């Protein structure tokens, strides 16, 4: 009897142990991180990232797969490199991955995450996003800014017409155009470059974009932040000071002009929220206003300007495509009047060209998110507070999604339903889900309009007898990926008016 009890006890204990072991095993399996390269002590895989991190990560993903784990410094990081994987992160588990990490750049440049772009997910971010969408980025508001777009674009066209036959720095001109349009929409007036900083708006915005995107050791090994080994903190403080002084000036001017009989703009609206009884709901103080204004400036200017630059660059490289776009526009508009915004929906081929450009040159090559809690994706454990990098550059080159992905071939979109507004994960130049771009409609309107006018009004050729294949297409990595070198070309006016 005693023997049989002993065997029974032994059996039960063994069984329980087996269950426990199985649970441990399945728990360990559930906690399986995605594959990825092994890192060095402390530095992790930071040494694998060079001048073009989106390209380095794309290459690594070809070995380790479309959901890859690497430790960057001390931080677990996940790189997402295929449309299917992006859908998991930005649609299926969007709520989990809708936050942003507290990077050094957001501390120094964005008033400690008080802006929208870098704000962590939560009620403050929701309120600011709602306010900007309603007061600046809704269709009604975008339409109300139409005269601003037309006036500024007319000035550019006049300038280029005068410069017919000579070399025009397209990058500089398109940059100033976007700066002027954005200042007028956001601040109610234009500011001259010399009222700001001798380097000019575009250069300074580019500096911000670069600083925000550079892999800062302090973001990955916070213990060494105070050493500022890359000199980034020093640069960030200097840049932030220039912008802060400028934004203070903008706000002061608006405060002083409060009683004037003029159309109220976005700055006035935010000032009224700061003073309103609902202040606590909005949490608007002077730093919050400055952070949001800087967001709008940075997000609107460089993104649209770079998209236009890259599209024109590809067209200069592919004269066949340039001619085809010009023909399409001419068929709709003729040569006796200028393109109007109401014409834009008729330019189907131009839209394909823009999609193809975004596929090959996404202006934001790495979307940076943070996980708000542990999550399992495709059987892989994604720990809370992981840095998530959605590699839109790699997605645009995924050979499972695109034939001959390195080839610029807008006709690939003929008869295809793939759109760029965040529903089709093969092409997500504006992101997708909760953190997707709220300025997409405005950005697309500007990009389509400027391109259509520049292509309708002028023929373009490269300077110095350069042939199209010689055009340098090198990138400059930043939060927005622009051309490394300015694009210059010689225009010839081609209309009858
Ligand atoms: C976010 C692209 C124009 C405001 C983003 C994101 C991308 C993007 C890829 C990040 C999405 C993510 O992290 O998942 C573009 C492109 C543009 C453009 C390609 C032009 C062609 C604009 C304009 C504005 C704007 C005109 C506003 C004036 C913003 C803001 C965010 C954002 C505020 C942050 C949203 C958030 O974190 O909630 N944009 N954008 N963008 N964009 Fe744009």
Image (cartoon, rainbow, N blue to C red):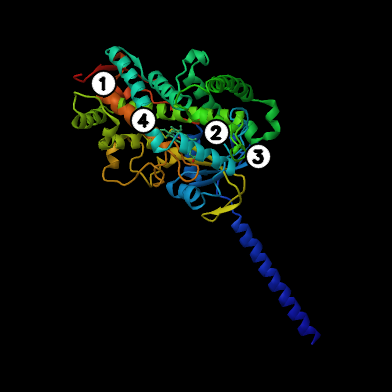
Q: What is the CA distance from the residue labelled 3 to the residue labelled 1?
A: 53 Å
Q: Which mark is residue 74?
A: 3
Q: What is the CA distance from the residue labelled 4 to the residue labelled 1?
A: 17 Å
Local SS, label 3: loop
Q: What is the CA distance from the residue labelled 1 to the residue labelled 2?
A: 41 Å
**Point 44% across, 37% down: residue:** 393
Q: Do the residues under discs 4 and 1 have CB atoms within 8 angstroms?
A: no
Residue 37 visible: no
Q: What is the CA distance from the residue labelled 4 to the residue labelled 2?
A: 31 Å
The residue singled out by tag 2 in the image is 49
Local SS, label 4: helix
Q: Quadrant of the C terminus?
A: top left
The residue singled out by tag 4 in the image is 447
Local SS, label 1: strand
| Ligand 1 neighbours mark 4 (CB distance < 8 Å) | yes
Number of other residues with Cα within 10 Å of mark 1, as a class: few under 14, some 14 to 19, many 20 or more: some
The residue singled out by tag 1 in the image is 458
């Amino acid at each position: 009897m005693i023997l049989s009890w002993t065997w029974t006890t032994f059996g039960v204990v063994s069984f329980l142990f087996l269950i426990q072991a199985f649970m441990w095993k399945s728990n360990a399996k559930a906690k399986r991180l995605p594959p990825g390269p092994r890192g060095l002590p402390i530095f992790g895989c930071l040494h694998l990232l060079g001048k073009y991190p989106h390209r380095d990560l794309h290459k690594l993903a070809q070995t380790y797969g479309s959901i890859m784990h690497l430790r960057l410094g001390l931080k677990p990081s996940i790189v997402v490199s295929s449309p299917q994987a992006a859908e998991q992160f930005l649609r299926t588990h969007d709520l989990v991955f809708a936050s942003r990490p507290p990077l050094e750049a957001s501390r120094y440049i964005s008033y400690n995450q008080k802006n929208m772009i870098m704000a962590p997910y939560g009620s403050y971010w929701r309120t600011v996003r709602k306010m900007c969408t309603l007061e600046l980025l809704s269709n009604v508001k975008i339409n109300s800014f139409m005269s601003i777009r037309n006036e500024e674009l007319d000035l550019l066209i006049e300038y280029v017409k005068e410069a017919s036959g000579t070399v025009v720095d397209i990058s500089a001109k398109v940059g100033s155009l976007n700066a002027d349009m954005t200042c007028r929409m956001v601040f109610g007036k234009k500011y001259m470059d010399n009222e700001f900083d001798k380097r000019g708006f575009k250069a300074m915005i580019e500096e911000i974009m670069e600083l925000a995107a550079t892999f800062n050791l302090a973001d990955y090994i916070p213990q060494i932040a105070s050493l500022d080994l890359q000199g980034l903190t020093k640069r960030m403080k200097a840049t932030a000071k220039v912008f802060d002084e400028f934004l203070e000036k903008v706000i002061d001017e608006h405060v002083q002009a409060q009683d004037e009989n003029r159309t109220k703009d976005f700055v006035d609206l935010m000032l009224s929220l700061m003073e309103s009884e609902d202040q606590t709901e909005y949490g608007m103080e002077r730093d919050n206003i400055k952070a949001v204004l800087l967001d709008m400036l940075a997000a609107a200017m460089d993104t649209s300007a770079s998209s236009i630059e890259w599209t024109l660059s590809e067209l200069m490289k592919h004269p066949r495509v340039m001619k085809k776009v010009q023909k399409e526009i001419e068929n709709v508009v003729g040569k006796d009047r200028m393109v109007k915004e109401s014409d834009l929906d008729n330019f189907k081929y131009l839209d394909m060209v823009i999609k193809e450009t975004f596929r090959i040159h996404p202006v934001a090559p790495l979307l940076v998110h943070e996980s708000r809690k542990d999550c399992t994706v495709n059987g892989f454990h994604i720990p809370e507070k992981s840095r998530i990098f959605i590699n839109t550059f790699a997605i645009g080159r995924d050979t499972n999604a695109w034939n001959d992905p390195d080839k610029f071939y807008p006709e690939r979109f003929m008869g295809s339903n793939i759109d760029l507004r965040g529903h089709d994960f093969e092409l997500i130049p504006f992101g997708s889900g909760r953190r997707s771009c709220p300025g997409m409609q405005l950005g697309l309107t500007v990009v389509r309009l400027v391109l259509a006018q520049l292509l309708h009004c002028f023929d373009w050729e490269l300077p110095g007898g350069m042939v199209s294949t010689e055009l340098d297409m090198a990138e400059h990595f930043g939060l927005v990926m622009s051309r490394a070198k300015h694009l210059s070309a010689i225009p010839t006016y081609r209309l009858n008016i």
